[in-house]
Amino acid sequence: MSYTAADLRKGLKIELEGIPYEVTEFEFVKPGKGQAMYKCRIKNMLLGTTMDKTFRAVDKIDQPNIESKTMAFSYKEGDKYVFMDNKTYEQVELHENVVGDQRFFLLEDLECEVLFFNHRAMTVTLPAFVIKEIKETEPGARGNTATNVLKPAKIDTGYEIGVPIFINVGDFIRIDTRTGKYVERVKQG
Amino acid sequence: MRRVLERRAQLNDAIRRFFRDRGFLEVDTPVVLPANAPEANIDAIPAGSGWLRTSPELAMKRLLAAGFEKIFQLGPVARAGEHGRWHHPEFSLLEWYRSGAGYLEILADAKALLSFLAGELRGATDFTWQGRPVSFAQELWERQSVSQAFIQHAGWDPALKFDPDRFDLDLVTRVEPALPPGHPVVLIDYPAPLAALARRKPDDPLRAERWELYLGGVELANAYSELNGPAEQRARFEEANTCRHRRGAEPYPLDETFLAALAQMPPSGGIALGVDRLLMILADADSLDAVLPFRHG
């Protein structure tokens, strides 16, 4: 399957030299007597890097074989993270480098979006928010409800996070997985 | 909306005064044509048994052949599929022609016109466009040959070994972005294969007497020493149709009335200038859409 340049638009996923890209910006250009072209900025879906690429109207552009599946985090083995499709029990492994800092926020059975390119799992995206238990922090000052003063705390994965003074060991907090920052305390159980 | 309409009316009025004061006759030629000049990359919008004009060029050259010496026209043209920040399928084009002249006389006209228009609409030749200083002062116009610009910014001379795909790509990705933004830049002497309706330089068959005007990376006008040999013009039209066929576009019929008249056309210079783009700059707008009160979807 392939696209023509006229199909280009923001958000379109394309394949160039075996690498999937997403179009993040595009502009129609045409020198007066010249051919129509599309100046694009494209994002490498595997590495997250961006580059500029100009397509001519006559160019054929490959359509990447990409699919996204909801899979649950199963377990970690060495530097591999294993995710499982809870319906088919299909399992995939992703290397620590691919999971990146998101690995600190994984929880058993947490449902994540795994992106497949040519049937190979390439990247994973966690839900925007996860709930984690505080494992280490200095005792909370009772009655201090200020949220703008932070102290260091650790969660089960060893990740260090700034939390308000009133947070204690055993408390559950909501974390934004995109920024790695504390959002709020949650009542658990 | 009112402001845009007023600015446009003011610009049109100033353009007409400029040409009338210099002895040009304003002409109106048909908008629906049995044939446009076939161009490799310009597609016409069908209308009735013919097409909307992509330019009034052929009709105006018939007037030159009939003995008119200085003519101008300000009116709408349409080109299929052109829509973007600097493009709209229907736009206002200013064309003027002088017989007994060439592209350099037209360049002198263009300099005088733009400095006049800046004075009329902005009160001075120097003004700001989207926060950047811009000057239409005649002494600041800069001329670069196409070969020189390509050698400097893209590392090759398209006049020596022409490659149409590489030319277009390098033009938009390397050359245009490198042009100085604050004053008019004229890219001059195009590779002969891009001559279209221009005559080749008498002393340099690799290049044609054509120039394009840029301001801030925006192409504003295209000028020629007009080709007036019917046989060569026919061959170029056929070549354009071959290019069209190669890219899967329909070939266009040739305008035989025009080709027959061309034998009588004296040596002439002519130009087409995009009025909406000029208005965008003079009205300090950031896109063509901002100066087009009626937009196509």
Image: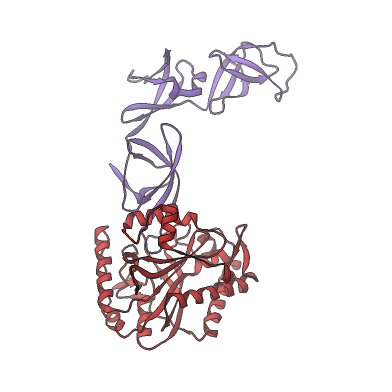
Chain colours: A purple, B red
Residue A85's spot in the image, x, y percent? 36, 21
- In the depicted structure, whether residue A86 falls above or below residue B95: above
Q: Which quadrant of the figure contains the N terminus of chain B?
A: bottom right
- Residue at the bottom extreme of this rendering: B67
Residue A15's spot in the image, x, y percent? 34, 39
- Residue at the front extreme of this rendering: B203
Q: Residue at x 35, y 33 (%)?
A: A66
Would you identify the image quadrant in which residue B52 lies? Answer: bottom left
Would you identify the image quadrant in which residue A21 lies? Answer: top left
Residue B234's spot in the image, x, y percent? 25, 74
For this rendering, which residue is in front, A87 or A40? A40
Q: Which quadrant of the figure contains the C terminus of chain B?
A: bottom left
- In the depicted structure, whether residue B111 falls above or below residue A164: below
For this rendering, which residue is in front, A141 or B72? B72
Residue B172's spot in the image, x, y percent? 43, 55
Q: Is residue B10 visible?
A: no
